[in-house]
Amino acid sequence: MIEQKTKPLEVRSIGSGLRRVDGVEKVTGRATYAAEQDSDDGGGEALHLWLVTSTIAKGRVLQVQAEHALAHPGVVDVVDHTTAPRLAETDNGELAILQNADVGFRGQIVALVLAESSEAAREGAALVDVDYDATPHEAEFREDNATYRPSVVNPSMETDTDQGDVDAALREADVVIGQTYSTPYEHNNPLEPHATVAWWGELDGRPMLSMFDSTQGVHGVVQPLATMWGLEPEQVRVRAPYVGGGFGSKGEAHAHVMAAALAARTTNGRPVRLAVTRQQMFQLTGYRTATISRFRLGARPDGTLTAIEHSVLEQTSKVREFAEQTASPTRMMYAAPNRRTTHRLAQLDVAVPSWMRAPGEMPGMFAHEVAMDELAVACGVDPIVLRERNEPDLDPETGKPYNNRRLLDCLHRGAERFGWETRPRDARAQADGDWWVGTGVASATYPAMKMPGNAARVRSLDQGRYAVAIGSVDIGTGARTVLTQIAADALGVEVEAIDLAIADSLLPSASVAGGSSGTSSWGSAIVAAAQRFRADHGNWPDPGVETTASAADSPADEKYAFHSFGAVFAEARVNRWTGEVRVPRLLGVYSVGRVINPVTAHSQFVGALVMGLSAGLFEESYRDPRFGHFLTQDLASYHVASHADVLDVDAEWLEESDELLTPMGSRGIGEIGIVGTAAAVLNATHHATGIRRRSMPLTPDQFLETPDAERP
Ligand code: MOS
């Protein structure tokens, strides 16, 4: 493999709205998702796997009584911690299931039922009796138990930062906003639930584990499985040809993937099929921690910030640590010489939290952007003018120049399109019948990342065609389509001349479809491989020659602070008698580098805006601390915005190209659309009603006009 210095591209297909290359497969039902796959190595019909999960939050399994389950005619086997294969390495407490009798949270996998049909497996699981020795657990996150200081926050950021003298600056500040903001537990809920088909075979006399898995990164699944089973990476193959969304919940392997691997190890080569249920996803496949953000902003009378303090409280699981980086955007968003951020966690006997679309930025910017709105009101300054006054010249966190900070351009363009200039200055100034009407704004930001460890392969075929391969996954975002466009431009051919292969860990290594980094990372590798190929073989190569290459590091990578920016505008209508909140208009304007495909990009932005709207108005998981699990565990009790909730939502982007980050000039667009969106909606409800809320979701009860309701 070669490291290749890449040059900017001659852009032809990039920027055009090429229709999804896999669109026909998807709409005709020919796209096969993980649960629909079969072994292509033989081994017979797949056995169906059902998970038995714990009904206590902490303690030990005394005995798994399998007789009744085994008496079911369809059940083949029941595997528990006494019979499960032993793993070579068990450091990852989430994945190291069935290795001992310990129970670390309610909903943890305690036994596996294998059967000839899905129905028999499910019935068998219900017939398994598990005896426990329960011990007291702690599953309630409170301000007073969030005292643990993690050594880093996700993925490897500093836990605390402290610049200048925040306390002195706050003492001297003319205006101080000191408030606490909170966000609830949330669950990712991609349309396709998690699923895995696994089987064991042999490769050159060594054991070989093969899988189809619904994942955001095939190499990211190979890695922990190989380590934990004591295998070399080439002894594990993972494929994910089609994935129905993830929002981060498929960014890393969760325990069910190990359950499928363990079960398949016991079947003498028969494949095992596991479809996780929607209900099980609420305990097993990750969620966003609830957060409490204590903010203190100090400012001059005109709103110029002198101090920013953001103290975060949130929770993690004792089974495996995950510390959401909620204060990370506060470190770089606005200018202020004195700034401090901290993260403290409650370590609980609960399911393992994980990534959910814009971990960190989403809850953190919710708090920051509501606090900024409060500061604007306190200073009598327009919220957009307030942001103009706090625009930094250099990144306040690193002191580096920004690659391309266009927050104000986004705010100004959005204001123009949204009609901001006619907005009444005062809250509670507009009504339409029984509805109070208002508008709000919030900023958005997301780091622009390019991941290491990506490579791509280019091979010439007959008749001027090329095979281009990289192990990246298209989780529904349009990656297959945009990578085809990037490859075509890099090779100087039409998109029809590209045969793209992805989603297989046998292909060159690819980083996760996460952190809004996929297109930047994989696209840069494809451009590097294509340019190397053309340098070595020219523009009319003989068929059958190939090159594999990675993008070389660029000197710019260290020189600049790479971020994308955006501005979200919302109109809210709040019914004065029922408290219902409707959002008739939602607009996001973004600066994200060059947009590779306006059709798939628009879909990403609008989808993320809807997800932010959904968070602002509806989404909340409720954990009962007495039992330790989430009671909301379906789409009836956990409401995700549906068509009737979504009115006029639109997004646009600034024309630009950012070749400091990638040769395509693009940054990334998966996550920024959810950042700030709930804050814009909340700020609009304040402008409509004069009632200031500081938590989401904005349920109707919070706006009821009863005599004892909070009034402006
Ligand atoms: Mo996203 S939460 O980085 O998959």
Image (spheres, rainbow, N blue to C red):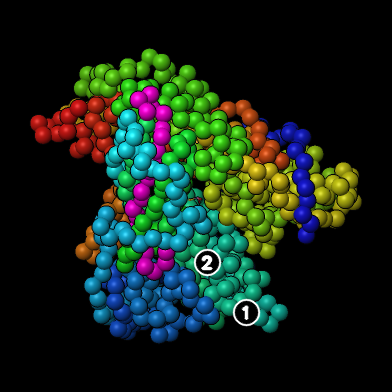
Lateral position of residue 203 relative to residue 433, left or right: right
Which residue does the numbered mark 2 point to in the structure image? 197
What secondary structure is found at the residue carrying circle 1?
A: strand
* Vertical side of 666 occupied by 135: above or below: below
Task: Identify the residue at image location x=28%, y=29%.
Answer: 686
Label 2: few (<14), some (14–19) or many (≥20) C-alpha neighbours in 10 Å: many
Residue 59 found in image quarter = bottom left
Quarter of the image with the N terminus in it: bottom right
- Please state the extent of the stretch shown in magenta in the rendering: 300-321
Please say if 334 is above or below 325: above
Q: Residue furthest top?
A: 422
Residue lying at 45% horizontally and 62% vertically, measured from the top left: 151
Residue 117's disc number? none
Going by the numbered disc 1, the residue's amino acid type is Pro
User: 653 and 493: which one is in front?
Assistant: 653
How many discs appear?
2
Q: Is residue 504 left or right of residue 380?
A: right
Label 2 residue near ligand 1, CB within 8 Å: no
Task: Kindly identify which residue carries mark 1.
Answer: 207
Horizontal side, residue 348 vs residue 528: left or right: left
Which quadrant does the C terminus fall into? top left
